[in-house]
Amino acid sequence: MTSTTSAPPYRRPGLRVLRPFGRGPLFAVSVAVLALLVLVAVLAPVLAPYDPEALDLSASLVGTTGDHPLGTDQSGRDVLSRLLHGARTGLLGPLLVVAVSTLLGTALGVLAAWRGGWVDTVLSRSMDMVFAIPGLLLAILLVSVVGSGLTAPVIAMSVAYTPYVGRLVRSIARQEKARPYIEAYRVQGWSGWTVCVRHLLPNIAPTVFAQSAMNFGYALMDLAALSFLGFGVQPPAADWGAMINEGQAAVLQGAMLPALAPSACIVLAVVAFGIVGEGLADRIAKRER
């Protein structure tokens, strides 16, 4: 006789779909690019040949040389050094945005899907209200109150990205809640909290992870745009968005690298995160067919 207390046999793939599958060269290249960016951000103080904030007006807008592989900006600062250090703020800000918005969005989405009723209605309408506010506008308003820097844009973009995650999690959590294994666990006497934490959350985690990878690229682009507009990281700190802003004048003088190099880094990072996110999403979809 089969024991009535045995766990239901149904179990979805869960986090196993996040194993590196490497079946597409573009995906593999994107993962390598992201790994390289992280490595560069961590080792920037070691890899950078110069102090990123050191001024040398006598070397203003020097082209590509052995001493300055990517030239210098208008203030004589080494572009390569600033690019390497800029990877730190370029990745740290989006990481904080994605971490905060994913945690809040997942909590709100699961709560709305699990409880249903008026809880679902209140949380859904609240997320819709926040969703209607443009993230960049919210960031600009917060910067005007708190002041420029990395803190205000990160808080604003975290709030703006939370409804994206929350609505996705609510949708997939509702589908997951309707599956037979959830009811089987509850019939056995498992508490709703235990079923959520031990079974529902691990099963929706791969989809959330894939969306977070894409959100990372979007957040990177938004934060760089705020720095470009002067609402984010301020000079002389090295930041890709601020470097593009500072390099605009150099373009008119025929020096392209001070603005082109950080632009290329932003595009490369955003595209790589998008490809990785899409690749994970496709993998998850194939596993669920």
Image (cartoon, grey):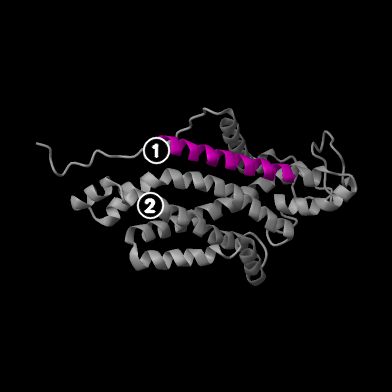
Q: Which residues are magenta?
A: 262-289
Can you give x and y, in whole percent of width and height, for residue 93 in the image? 60, 53
The N terminus lies in quadrant: top left
* Label 1 sits on residue: 288
Instruction: Tell me the number on the disc at residue 173.
Output: 2
Q: Foreground: 44 or 63?
A: 63
Most common SS among magenta residues: helix
| Residue pictured at 68% horizontal, 38% vertical | 47
Q: Foreground: 50 or 236?
A: 236
Q: Is residue 256 left or right of residue 206?
A: right
Graded by Cα atoms within 10 Å as few (under 14), some (14 to 19) or many (20 or more), the crowding at tag 1 reads few
Q: Marks 2 and 1, how far apart in space? A: 15 Å
Can you give x and y, in whole percent of width and height, for residue 129 in the image? 52, 67
Graded by Cα atoms within 10 Å as few (under 14), some (14 to 19) or many (20 or more), the crowding at tag 2 reads many
Q: Eyeballing the image, is 168 above or below 25? A: below
| Residue pictured at 69% horizontal, 62% vertical | 231
Q: Eyeballing the image, is 54 above or below 135? A: above
Question: To which quarter of the image does residue 6 belong?
Answer: top left
Can you give x and y, in whole percent of width and height, for residue 262 in the image? 73, 45
Q: Is residue 262 left or right of residue 103?
A: right
**Contact, mark 2 vs mark 1 (Cβ under 8 Å):** no
Q: Is residue 33 visible?
A: yes
The kind of residue tagged 2 is: Ala
Label located before the other in sequence (2 or 1) = 2
The kind of residue tagged 1 is: Glu
